[in-house]
Image: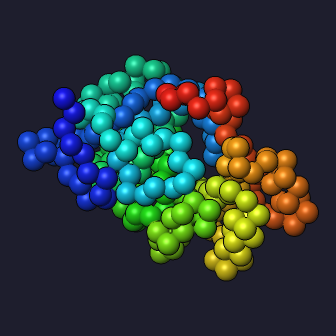
Amino acid sequence: MNEPFSAQPDAPAPDSAPERLRITEIFLSLQGESRSVGWPTVFIRLTGCPLRCGYCDTAYAFQGGEWMSLDDILTRTAGFDVQHVTVTGGEPLAQKVCLPLLARLCDAGYEVSLETSGALDVARVDPRVVKVMDLKTPGSGEVERNRYCNLEHLNPRDQIKFVLCDRVDYDWAREQLVKYELPHICEVLFSPVQGQLAARELADWIVADRLPVRFQIQLHKYLWGDVAGK
């Protein structure tokens, strides 16, 4: 039987296993978004998330999973024999041991990225990790959770991602570009929510406004749909 798991950011692993993480799945696929799109990538999906975005496609990671030691996670990852690793969720930073996991992966020589909601502190993330950080839009239902002080801890290797539901989200995101001078911090990504905003429509808006952002779609959804573990 699965042990209960809290989605709160400071939820600890059991005292008897301080270097373990609750893991939903570890699998090999193609990276479907971000700068490393298309590369064979090992995804380490941590369990739990304190947010409830309206378009979330990984709600199955909110609960369940299994406790794994960092050594076991590294061994499982090594078995796939690829260079790129993405730590994702849920919200991976909701488990404190995510930080030593990221450092261990970097020490092992992987090219590591972290997919995070932007609602939790990224200041202590290993600087070798590429942070792919969301800014949540009004359409997500979680816009009030944005932690704008995180912008101070991003570097040019990182990426800021906007997942857009409609024109209202687009206009809001465009305002944030100017207000926080985001293109001067790092690369900015605009993605449509599949089934809510047509990709071509978003592309036309970006071109018309000549925005300094990278348009992208979720490649994995076009290849495999909503199949978990892809």
Q: Quadrant of residue 163?
A: bottom right
Looking at the image, which residue sits at the far bottom?
179
Residue at the spot 59% in from the left edge and 32% down from the top edge: 226
Say if 230 sits above or below 153 in the image: above
Residue at the spot 51% in from the left edge and 64% down from the top edge: 142
Q: Considering depth in this image, is 63 or 30 the residue closer to the camera? A: 63
Q: Considering depth in this image, is 14 or 156 the residue closer to the camera? A: 14
Say if 79 sits above or below 55 in the image: above
> Could you tell me which quadrant the C terminus lies in?
top right
Is residue 36 toward the left or the right of residue 14 in the image?
Answer: right
Is residue 116 toward the left or the right of residue 22 in the image?
Answer: right
Question: Total number of numbered labels?
Answer: 0
> Could you tell me which quadrant the N terminus lies in?
top left
Percent position of residue 172, x then y? 69, 71
Is residue 65 toward the left or the right of residue 121 in the image?
Answer: left
Is residue 101 toward the left or the right of residue 45 in the image?
Answer: left
